Amino acid sequence: MTVREKAFAWLIILAGFILIAWLFQPILLPFVAGMAIAYFLDPIADRLERLGIARGWAAAWTLLGFTVLSIALLLLLLPVIQSQIVGLAERLPAIISTLQGWLIALVDQLQVVLAPEDFEGLQSALKSEIGTGFEIVTDLVKGVFERGMAVFEFLSLVLVTPVVAFYLLRDWDAIVTRIDGLVPRGHRETVRQQARAVDDTLAGFVRGQASVCLLLGLGYGGALALAGLPFGFTVGMLAGLVSFIPYVGAVFGMIISVGLALVEFDDPIRILIVVAIFAVGQAIEGNFLTPKLVGDKVNLHPVWIIFALFAGGSLMGFAGMLIALPVAAVIGVGVRFLVGQYKASRLYDQEGPH
């Protein structure tokens, strides 16, 4: 088989995979979620298996422990978060009104300082950028809730995901071995190296970032609650959980928290404390949590992560967001491999005319 025929065959396989994903996207969510859970828990099941526990029982005990821990966290946090979300929704108009007042005052100051043509240019640019950003976020959220959290999909997520996760977790090593056996023998070692690179990237990001998000959420929530900010625990938890999107969690949490502080506090010191909580949180995340828990193997640029999440959510809703990171990791590893091949080729080393 020639190189062109091999490339054509791989293109057909890729096109078939994309077509299947597009055709079955309404029912993909529980299967993708189950696969994500199985991948996340596989190291724990492997460790139990090394202790002498049969793989089936190791998978069952691992999934049971994960389920019990998740339910316990929900039962512990859900009542507090639910009541705070209701209260926050009731206060949201007042927060928006206060922020609008601050923005109007800022615009008035800029109008005095800037020349008329500069001010009009700034105003039109801000309207365009804000409108575009709002439209993107609105479409993404709309897609997530319309396609990802419909009643049928929610029920299938609750009922089907644990079953899918158990069987995938039980047979994970066998599935990997079977896929490895299908790889052409001449390229098996190269494919294995790239697969290990993808696994390192995903493991570093998914497993590490999940820990970072949880710790940030608890840290932000606890600190804001101690600072006396109403609904601070919920806002902090949401900011931490959204932190898997680079910088978005901190910016989101700071905007909401400062808006709440402006409405609730008359003391500027208390407002500065709220700002300081997120500044300290970002410093801890960047200098301690991310280096220790995520490490330096991720090799995914923040802009690439944001683009992948937005693209996946826009195309396939919540299931697309779950698929986005593995796809981004595979593409990233593939691009680095091709760049390495190019730099090792004669085309890169060829000298120009003298």
Image (cartoon, helix red, strand yellow):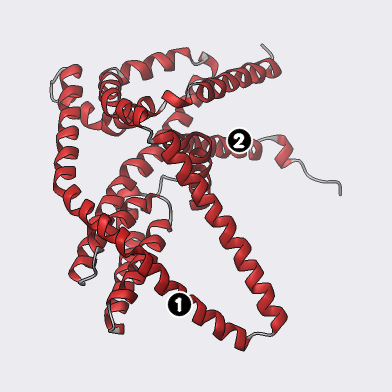
* Residue furthest bottom as drawn: 112
Instruction: Give residue 338's mark.
Output: 2
Q: Residue 240: image x %, image y %?
A: 31, 55
The CA span between labels 2 and 1 is 53 Å
Instruction: Give residue 135's mark.
Output: none
Q: Residue 25: image x %, image y %?
A: 47, 26
Q: Is any atom of residue 336 visible in this view?
A: yes
Q: Is residue 139 shown above or below 264? A: above
Along the horizontal axis of the image, is 153 left or right of 320? left
What residue sits right under mark 1 in the picture? Answer: 101
Write the residue at 32% across / 78% down. 272
* Residue furthest right as drawn: 354
Occupied quadrant, residue 73: top left
Find numbered disc 2 in the image and state the secondary structure of the residue it sits on.
helix
Write the residue at 26% across / 62% down. 220
Tell me which amino acid carries mark 2. Answer: Leu
For the residues bearing labels 2 and 1, Cβ distance under 8 angstroms: no
Q: Total of numbered circles in the picture?
A: 2
Image quadrant in which the N terminus is located: top right
Tell me which amino acid carries mark 1. Answer: Gly
Occupied quadrant, residue 13: top right
Q: Residue 60: image x %, image y %?
A: 17, 23
Q: Is any atom of residue 301 visible in this view?
A: no
Write the residue at 43% across / 54% down. 246
Find numbered disc 1 in the image and state the secondary structure of the residue it sits on.
helix
**Pointer 1: residues within 10 angstroms few (<14), some, or many (20+)?**
few
Q: Front-most of 76 and 4?
A: 76
Q: Is residue 96 shown above or below 156? A: below
**Pointer 2: residues within 10 angstroms few (<14), some, or many (20+)?**
few
Along the horizontal axis of the image, is 143 left or right of 131? left
